[in-house]
Image (cartoon, rainbow, N blue to C red):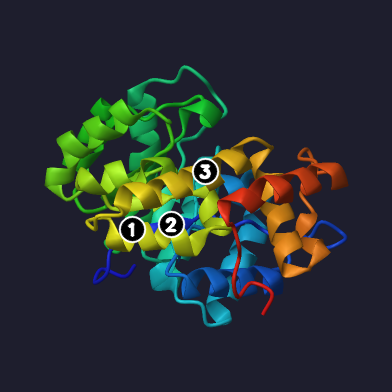
Amino acid sequence: MNQESKPRGVLSPVVTPFDSNLKPDAERLARHCRWLLTNDVGLAVFGTNSEANSMSVGEKLDLLERLVGAGLPPARMMPGTGCCALTDSVELTRAAVRLGCAGVLMLPPFYYKGVSDDGLYRSYAEIIERVGDERLRIYLYHIPPVSQVPISLALIERLLKAYPGTIAGVKDSSGDWNNTKAMLEQFQPQGFDVFAGSETFLLATLRGGGAGCISATANVNPGAIARLAASWRQADAERQQAALDAVRKVFQSMPMIPALKAAIAHFSGDAVWGAVRPPLVSLTEAQVGALVSALQPTGFAMPGLAG
């Protein structure tokens, strides 16, 4: 993986478009990725909001190959490769390394609950040993509200000691600023990069020495989020953060993934984007209307998307 430029700033767990047969649409995905890159947002494909766990390993491998083949820079990618099955995680991670991705975002195995730190350590260690490549850079994905399998500070410390450099950072989607702050204070001095799980904590994370954020709403509001990441030391940073929070609040008022896709469909004029894979359900026309109306007072726009 690319060792010269560590991921920094803002990344998006890129939403995955599906065609009328609910198959991943690689061309639409590549276009959306290009639009994100023009707004200085990196590509955390196969994240939570990508509906990654509604796709097979084969589908994800094919999409990753096709994105790189379409000329999208793997140095700006941090694909999600953490699966319930150890061998699936290894296969996806090997592919990301081979293609030159900057890092991988790795969920813990999340089906079994109440597993010990010893078990999680063994899982991450086994993946690292089986991939067996010094280029591997893992960003741990802590999202206990969804996975119900937390990544503790003690586990991070143990992994860092055993695999310095390979364990490169974390995305903290706990929603608990005190947890993010503890990660920053304890591990950031060791070169461990901390990404907030949403732009809600972007300014605070950057002020604490963090790397940035990996946020669902970077799919739809990339320019404004990236602007704060680039200008957080300026006098208007608090105002920028408040504006981001206002947009985020609207999207959080509805099911997040269908709302993101509905916004892309509306502002691009491409209705195909509204599709989600079961068990998720697309927004109704009434919900789309309410979403667009609620966004209007924020000044929300998606310039350049339709092109």
Q: Nearer the viewer, residue 188 or 69?
A: 188
The label nearer to you, 2 versus 3, is 3
> As displayed, is residue 187 above or below residue 153?
below
Q: Is residue 258 left or right of residue 82?
A: right
Q: In which quadrant of the rendered image does the N terminus lie?
A: bottom left
CA gap, disc 2 and disc 3: 12 Å
CA–CA distance in space, label 1 to label 3: 17 Å
Assign a secondary structure to mark 3: helix
Q: Residue 208 vs residue 202: left or right?
A: left
Disc 1 designates what residue? 229
- Identify which amino acid the numbered label 1 is placed on: Ala
The crowd level at tag 3 (other Cα within 10 Å; few <14, some 14-19, many 20+) is some
The residue singled out by tag 2 in the image is 225
* Residue neighbourhood size for the residue with mark 1, other residues' Cα within 10 Å, grouped as few (<14), some (14–19), many (≥20): many
Report whether residue 292 is seen: yes
Instruction: Tell me the residue that label 3 is attached to.
Output: 246
Does residue 54 appear in the picture of this structure? no
